[in-house]
Amino acid sequence: MTSDIMRILFIGDIVGQPGMAMVKRAVPLLIAVEKIDLVIANAENASAGSGLTAGAYHQIRQAGVDLVTLGDHIYKKQEFISVLEKDDRVCKPANFPADAPGRELIHAVARDGTPVAAFCLLGRTFMRPVDCPFQAADRILAALAGQCGCVVVDMHAEATADKYLMAHHLKGRVSAVLGTHTHVPTADEQVLPPGTAFISDVGMTGPYDSILGRRIDRVLSSTITFVPSSFEVASGDPRLAGALVEIDPASGRATAIRRLMVNEADLANLERKQALRQTTQEPMTEPAAQV
Ligand SMILES: [Fe+2]
Ligand SMILES: [Fe+2]
């Protein structure tokens, strides 16, 4: 039995241990507080800032993430290739070569009973050459026709124009086109008629006292002196960044999108409220922290 409105939480690039710690603490709380029906996360930077290990993947899933998308760092941890070949909740970019390990489309049934499909695409501006993302999206949607009305697309791209182009190519054909990869949240969330939620980038889930998740001193010195150094994951100011999308399950059309940013103080507040809620058994009505 589906509800009137399905709520999907989409989480941007999880970066290293700070990002993992935020996911483990925040996702269960957000599911309860925001009445989330399905959680999707991009986890391409979850393990040491580059790639994903099997252990981290299972921790992300255990935290409540239903579907996992990836990006250009997908194969940085060799051990994860066997997971990509077997597991049906994690996908490779759909415009990768057919022989690249992993599936291009994933499915889950949301908590309200609505089937949801998801896939990710890589942009082609200032990125490694890949197949046409527009043709890849068309191919997948043709294969999906009539089988699943709620479809979420992770557009993993460097250029905002690539993301706008994909959103307009897919408007009215998918529920949401949500941007990842730049690790910097944008303020352009909107619902494109007749019902496709869009944002250029939801931002990263990781340390914001950083250069896109990496230690400022390392990146800065390397940039100024040209002497290479290891770009370790930073630790300060961890935050969870994402978007909350409301979808009419009957039509698959999005009705609303809201940016979400949860820092340590917000998280402590959520934990306190959740503890109070469990004590009193009263339903929560206050929204979680937002931008
Ligand atoms: Fe990326
Ligand atoms: Fe990333």
Image (cartoon, helix red, strand yellow):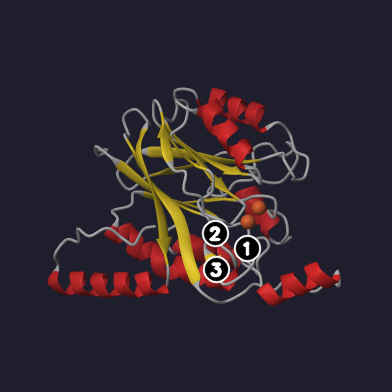
Q: CB under 8 Å between callouts 2 and 1? A: yes
User: What residue is shown at x 22% (from left), y 60% (from top)?
Assistant: 286
User: Where does the image place residue 80, in percent across and percent down from the top left?
Assistant: 67, 58
Q: CA distance from mark 2 to mark 3?
A: 8 Å
Q: Secondary structure at mark 2?
A: loop
Q: Which residue is mark 2?
A: 204
User: What residue is shown at x 74% (from left), y 45% (from top)?
Assistant: 127
Q: Secondary structure at mark 3?
A: loop
User: Where does the image place residue 256, in percent across and percent down from the top left?
Assistant: 34, 40
Q: Which residue is mark 1?
A: 212
Q: Residues within 10 Å of mark 2 (few under 14, many from 20)?
A: many
User: What residue is shown at x 39% (from left), y 25% (from top)?
Assistant: 194
User: Where does the image place residue 10, in percent across and percent down from the top left?
Assistant: 45, 50
Specify the amino acid type for callout 2. Answer: Met
Q: Residues within 10 Å of mark 1 (few under 14, many from 20)?
A: many
* Numbered badge on residue 161: none
Residue 222 in sight: yes
User: What residue is shown at x 60% (from left), y 46% (from top)?
Assistant: 91
- Residue at mark 1: C-beta within 8 A of ligand 2: yes
Pick the quarter of the image with the C terminus. Answer: bottom left
Specify the amino acid type for callout 1. Answer: Leu
- Name the front one of labels 2 and 3: 3
Say which label, 2 or 1, has the lower sequence index.
Answer: 2
Q: Nearer the viewer, residue 11 or 64?
A: 11
Specify the amino acid type for callout 3. Answer: Tyr
User: Where does the image place residue 11, in percent across and percent down from the top left?
Assistant: 48, 55
Q: Which residue is mark 3?
A: 208
